[in-house]
Image: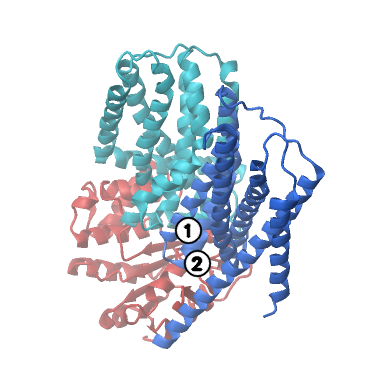
Amino acid sequence: MSISTHLIETSHLSKRYGNRFGLKDADLNVENHEIFALMGPNGAGKSTLLRILATLTRPTSGEVKIFGYDILKQEIQVRRLIGVVLHHSLLYDELSGRENLSFYMRLYGFRNKDILKKSIKDKASLFGVEDRLDDHVGTLSSGLKKRFDIVRAIIHNPRILLLDEPFSSLDLEGVEHLKNYLNWAKGSSTIIFSTHNLDIAEEISDRIATLKDSQITEIRCIK
Amino acid sequence: MKDKPILAGLFLANLISLYMIFIWAPPERSLGDSYRVFFIHTPAAWVSYLAFAITFLGSILYLKTEKPMWDLYASSASLLGLLFCLVTLITGSMWAKLAWGIYWNWDPRETSTLILLLVYLAYISFRMSISDKDRKARTSAVLGILAFVSIPLSYFSAVFWATLHPMPLFPINRPQLGIEPSMLLTLAVSMIGVTLLFSWMFYLTLNMYRMTEKAELSLLEIKE
Amino acid sequence: MTKRTMPFLSSSVTFLEDALEILFKDLRLELRRGYEIYSIMVLALLSNLSFGFALGIMNPNVLEFVPAVLWISILFIGMLGFTTVFVREMDKGTIDGLRLAPISPQAILLGKTIYTFMLMCVGAVFIIPSSMIILNYTFRSDYLLVILFLGLGILNIAVVGSMVSALAMYSESRALIIPALSLPLVPGTLVPSILATGKLATGATIDMILSELQLNLAFLLLMVAAFWITFEYVLYD
């Protein structure tokens, strides 16, 4: 296994959906402890790029290395390292927040009851939802549900966070929690997120990539 | 056209085989002329198995290589396999009607051929119900493998069932056909003719799909 | 697709734990929803009742129909359950949560298959005793043998059902495609199961149903092997 110099490295990454491109020839390097924003109009390829990095969509061509792991061949190792928030919630409506979080944590191999309990409480309190842990997720408002979904994504202490428009359905309080969390998490992890909101992108990220028509058109540094 | 000589050969082979089937081969001593349907029935059955085997191999190769070509092979072969499977069933039950008085007699081969037909009908309707090309190719490749694996299982169940339910009216041990060398030769020629016919149809189906795809692509370019 | 690392013996404990995790999650969801188990119960009674009407009470030939009646009911109830296995995960979007988990795809398949099996067993537990009362027959064979054999037959259908559900989640006509795919795939186990059930009702011993047992075991082995190898291509998009 080759040790790559960048934490996330993609080269000539493309995804074709039938006859049109979802992503075209994307070259991207993301460094450790970086917050990286993806901007661009709807259908520009942000979600496709994030889904490929998250091992959910297989690229048509090109390579991705995360921590030196090839995401096509060593996806289990990659999955251990990443935490992912998608547009839709990955929580089960009929289960409580605690049950959801504990289910996902167990899939990551955490099976000690005390550790589970403590981590769920700690992570939930970061987003101000610790007193709603026993409500069924289906009964929560969309803002709270989103907060729980973010807690789910960070429950196993991922080294890399991939967030697809995490701010979009959050309430104001949730947005503040997430900003604070990202600033804190930067110390130990790398974050890639997509957004429509230029203010937020400029406020918290180190670099911003702009996508248009399935291609990366520009990458600029903020700080 | 470069495939003209091939086409001529194919036409000639089938013409000869038709002559042999209907005129040259002598009538069978106990069945008379009705047995001639086997000269079509048997090659059709063989070709349908061949087609489903192509679907199976195409499916495996698609999953291994992800080349759209193999998916094209699998889907085209399944369509033709279905067609020849239907011919097998129809000619088989026609003969059954003549020989035993009923179209359907639950012979294990008959039953398992019907199940075969249903499996690949399901395969094709499954293909039709998915619009995304990559998804369609990948999931139906899996189904193409499962379908093929299920065939021997169904066949042995049908055989087993038939041994438990021997029908007094239609004895399992059929009268032996009085086979003469000329009949075997006719069968061999017909086998070759039908196999050639299948290859040509397979080639046409592949081309048809390729052209449809090309047309769709250029239509998209015009739109852009 | 590339070859994924197979679960090694050392990690087989984790493998089983992962499968059980999926199973427990599904069972919890099912119990909390409730209405599916409830409908399965109602349908089980209803199918017995309608077959009772069709065959006539105290029909002297009841044993000729009962095995087929039983297995057709079990199969149809199973098909109701198949939609919950993978199709619902796809509809709710939670399938991405399972895809993101760093576990072997076969562990997911195993957990889902055991779940399908248990759901069908709930149906069978209602169908079989109630049909014995309504259609007026009994199993004269050793009850342990009856339970084991019926369990094997149900397991076979459950194996096919969970895989069909996984394939059907990509289809745009799920309600039609689940029966269309499962019916032609099951004769290999349905026929021996029906035949042996008839024999068990008249008091067969294990060596009298040995052929059916072998056919069902062969079905299980071949199908599990085929699903095991191909499942990862179905799960990941």
Measured from the top left, where is residue B188 in percent x and y? 76, 51
Asked whether, in this view, residue A61 is left or right of residue A160, the answer is: right
The cyan-coloured chain is labelled: C
Inspect this view and state whether residue B155 appears: no
* Residue nearest the observer in this picture, C24 or B183: B183
- Tell me which amino acid carries mark 2: Arg
Number of residues whose C-alpha sits closer than 10 Å to that of mark 2, classed few (under 14), some (14–19) or many (20 or more): some
Chain containing mark 1: C
Tell me the element at label 1. loop
**Residue in the image at 46% along x and 69% along y:** A52
Asked whether, in this view, residue B2 is left or right of residue C203, the answer is: right
**Which quadrant is the N terminus of chain B positioned in?**
bottom right
In the displayed structure, A40 sits above or below B137; it is below
**Which quadrant is the C terminus of chain B positioned in?**
bottom left
**Residue in the image at 64% along x and 42% along y:** B34
* Residue nearest the observer in this picture, C55 or B170: B170
Chain containing mark 2: A
The red-coloured chain is labelled: A
Disc 2 + disc 1, Cβ < 8 Å: yes
* Residue nearest the observer in this picture, A212 or C171: C171
| Colour mapping | by chain
Query: Chain B's colour?
Result: blue
**Residue in the image at 56% along x and 65% along y:** B72
Q: Which disc is residue A58 wearing?
A: 2
Measured from the top left, where is residue C143 in percent x and y? 45, 15
Tell me the element at label 2. loop
Which residue position holds label 1?
C236
Q: Quadrant of residue B205?
A: bottom right
Asked whether, in this view, residue A146 is left or right of residue A220, the answer is: left
- Tell me which amino acid carries mark 1: Tyr
